[in-house]
Each structure stands twice: as structure tokens, then as C-alpha cells.
Amino acid sequence: MIHHAEILNILKSVYNKYDGVRIGLAGSYANNSATANSDIDVVIDGDSMRMDIAEYIKNLFNVPVDILWLELLKKDDEELDRFALSVGLPENEYSVYKTIKREVEWV
């Protein structure tokens, strides 16, 4: 199993390689609850059309990696919140976007 510090070091090298993006770690590796079956959740805040960054990151690890584009999550979250409010429901404070914003560990 890969260690938290090793993931952060690798992500720091990616951050230094690509301009205009912020990179963070989320999920079980960020909150120190990873198991041997855990994947790595990488958050990217930047141009979501830069699939080259996602592929580059995925190839750096020997375990599955989920890439979470912050701007796309935000867009979906805002749309769902607007819908909820339009039908008299409250905003979802526990959405993926809002959870990641609270828990992400930026490099």
C-alpha cells in the first residue's frame, strides 16, 4: 500500500510540472482511513479540458486513481442546489463538491 507522504510528494511534482492548476488529495488517503483496496482520489482545480494531466497522474501510481475536477463538481452541485431550492428543499451540505472543499489536502 502506498503511503500518504509518498502520494503528496508525487502530487507536488505534478503541481510543479503544470501551470494554472491546483492539485489536492481527498478521500481515504487524505483522511488516513485508506485500506489495501483504496483508490487515490486526486482533486484538480483548473482547466477540466486538460485530460493530459489526468492521464499523467494516473500513470504515476500502481493503484487505481480517481480524478475529481473541482469545477465540474461545482457546476453539478450548483445545478442540484438550484433544483432543490426550486422544489422547496434545502441545499445539500454533504454533496461531493462541498465535502471535498472541506476535506481536500492541497499540495
Image (cartoon, grey):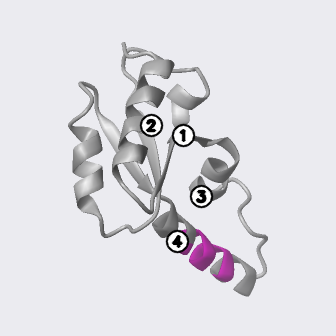
**Relative image position of residue 66 (x, y in whole percent):** 36, 43
Q: Residue 79 in magenta?
A: yes
State the residue in front, 88 or 98. Answer: 98
Judge the density around disc 2: few (<14), some (14-19), many (≥20) Cα neighbours within 10 Å.
some
Q: For the residue marked with disc 4, what is the amino acid?
A: Asp
* In front: label 2 or label 4: 2
Left/right placement of residue 24 relative to residue 18 reads right
Q: CA distance from mark 3 to mark 1?
A: 18 Å
Sequence-first disc among 1 and 4: 4
Residue picked out by circle 1:
107
User: Can you tell which quarter of the image residue 60 is in?
Assistant: top left
| Helix, strand or loop for disc 1 | loop
Residue 66 — which label? none
Residue picked out by circle 2:
12
At x 44%, y 37%, the residue is: 12
Judge the density around disc 1: few (<14), some (14-19), many (≥20) Cα neighbours within 10 Å.
some
Q: For the residue marked with disc 3, what is the amino acid?
A: Tyr
User: Looking at the image, do the residues carrying marks 4 and 3 touch, with CB atoms under 8 Å apart?
Assistant: yes
Up-down relation of residue 23 to residue 65 (above or below): below
| Helix, strand or loop for disc 3 | helix
Which portion, as a residue range, is magenta? 75-82
Q: CA distance from mark 1 to mark 2?
A: 6 Å
User: Looking at the image, do the residues carrying marks 1 and 2 touch, with CB atoms under 8 Å apart?
Assistant: yes
Residue picked out by circle 4:
76
Q: For the residue marked with disc 2, what is the amino acid?
A: Lys
At x 22%, y 57%, the residue is: 52
Residue picked out by circle 3:
97
Q: CA distance from mark 4 to mark 3?
A: 8 Å
Q: For the residue marked with disc 1, what is the amino acid?
A: Val
User: Looking at the image, do the residues carrying marks 2 and 4 touch, with CB atoms under 8 Å apart?
Assistant: no
